[in-house]
Amino acid sequence: MLEKDTPRGEVAVLSSTQKVLKKPGTVRVARGMSLFGEHSAGWFALGLLGAAVDRDRRKDWLVASAGVVGAHAASIAVKRVVRRRRPDHPSVEVLVGTPSKLSFPSSHATSTTAAAVLYSGLTGRNLVPALVPPMLASRLLLGVHYPTDVLAGAALGGVVGGLIRRKLTKKR
């Protein structure tokens, strides 16, 4: 018979992920990623840098940057409707502070995926595989999201980023 505190379902996946990934170096990197992605500020700043450097496509970079912030805002709106609480189980250690107690979807996953999709179109390089999986894993490692939170956030960011990227591509 399972004990009351035995992790099951998504909590078991989250707990197992932490056991595998939790090392001082990976926690430090994950916390840095969390700070960078907070309120989509790091991704927005990178978009503004792109606008400053790539004068020929400045407007596209600004639209993409606004799209990243818009994706973040969309995730906040969904959070407020769904109101899923963050993980709270003895087998899950929370390793970073959060601005709210709401979990679904992950705003970090949303804005990171939107940035990866949008900035891929502007750089000509597929940034999604390099940027999205590490951010999703970091949210699990830090114990602040369930697996479905990060997957839903990535899906939302991909949809928002894809729609805006399509408009930018059509314009050319």
Image (cartoon, rainbow, N blue to C red):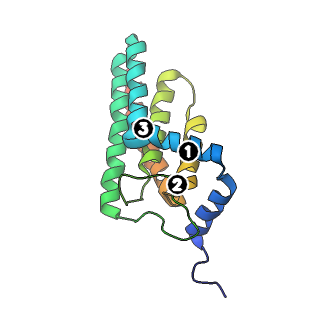
In the figure, 126 relative to 100: above or below? above
Task: Say which element carries label 3.
Answer: helix
Please tell me which residue is depicted at 55% across the width and 61% down the height of the picture: 93
* Image x and y of residue 171, in percent: 36, 23
In the figure, 164 relative to 101: above or below? above
Question: Residue 112 or 60: which is nearer the viewer?
Answer: 112
The amino acid type, in three-letter code, at marker 1 is Ala
Of pointers 2 and 1, the one earlier in the residue sequence: 1
Q: How many marks?
A: 3
Mark 3 — residue? 161
Mark 1 — residue? 30
* Image x and y of residue 107, in percent: 41, 48
Cα gap from disc 2 to disc 1, whole angstroms: 9 Å
Task: Say which element carries label 2.
Answer: loop
Q: Residue 104's quadrant in the figure?
A: bottom left
Of pointers 3 and 1, the one earlier in the residue sequence: 1
